[in-house]
Amino acid sequence: LHQPMYLLLCNLSFVDICFISTTIPKMLVNIQTQSQVITYTGCITQIYFLILFEVLDDFLLTMMAYDRFVAICRPLHYTVIMNPKLCRLLLLVSWILSALYSFLESLMVLRLSFCTVLKIPHIFCELNQIVKLACSDTFLNNLVIYLSTVLMAGVPFAGILYSYSKIVSCIRGILSAQGKFKAFSTCVSHLSIVFLFYCTGLGVYLSSAAAQSSHSSAVASVMYTMVTPMLNPIVYSMRT
């Protein structure tokens, strides 16, 4: 359990628990009290923690892809490359970058002014929706969102794609069919979670960008904030 993959899985589980805790308790209270109101302070706080754990999920999935790359393509050097010191350093850097980025986005929202009572077509305070509802100029906010999305989501996703391109190349070089199946089977759980994470995240983004019904936006929100974190431990525990 002290192997790098289990260390990353432990962090992923913790982040998923925290991610759910930023939205579900508030949603349950709203259902119980028949109220759909969230305060301005509560909304900003929710944005901060949602972004924090969302970006951490992204970084963790990238590190897990790198772990699979080293395990399959550099098996004899695995214990040297993926040593505990490197894993802890990567985790520390991920937490710091995620905290700084979420703090920046929260500050950018604080500079905006809002006219009246606002209606958000999600079960949580989604950043793009909040920026759209502002009465002041949002050019700088949109610029920061687009640039940071490229850096914080695009770069890790590119890292995952690069890792798997190398993994596929290595698997193709294995002669026996049993060896290919064994190598690929170690990646199935991770690939499933990557697919769920990015597809549901894209669904929330598209439902925010497009003029869709509030029902569609709510479904995308539930899939992203509840279903994906719930399925992560199920997928990995079954595989383990």
Image: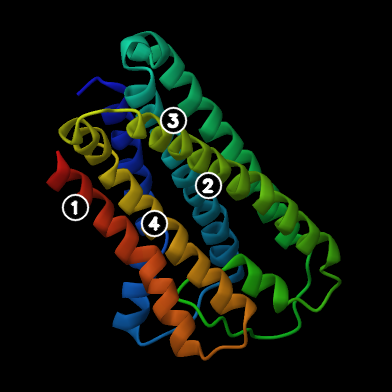
At a point 35% along the width and 34% down the height, the residue shown is 172
Instruction: Determine the secondary structure under disc 1.
Output: helix
Residue at point 46% right, 32% down?
Answer: 166
Q: In the drawing, what numbered circle is on residue 66?
A: 3
Tell me if 3 is positioned left or right of 41 in this view: left
Residue type, label 3: Tyr
Left/right placement of residue 85 relative to residue 33 reads: right
Q: Residue at x 39, y 64 (%)?
A: 225
Check residue 195 in the rendering and tell me which mark sits there, or answer none.
4
- Quadrant, the N terminus: top left
The mark lying in front, picked from 1 and 3, is: 3
For the residue pair 203 and 22, the one nearer the viewer reads as: 203
User: Callout 2, which amino acid?
Assistant: Val
Residue 28 to residue 229: above or below = below
Question: Is 58 placed left or right of 111 in the picture?
Answer: left
- Earlier-in-chain disc, 1 versus 3: 3
User: What distance separates the C-alpha of mark 1 from that of mark 4?
Assistant: 15 Å
Q: For the residues marked 1 and 3, what is the alpha-carbon distance in whole angstroms?
A: 22 Å
Check disc 2 and report the residue beneath it. Answer: 55
Quarter of the image holding residue 68? top left
Dot 2 or dot 3: first in sequence order is 2
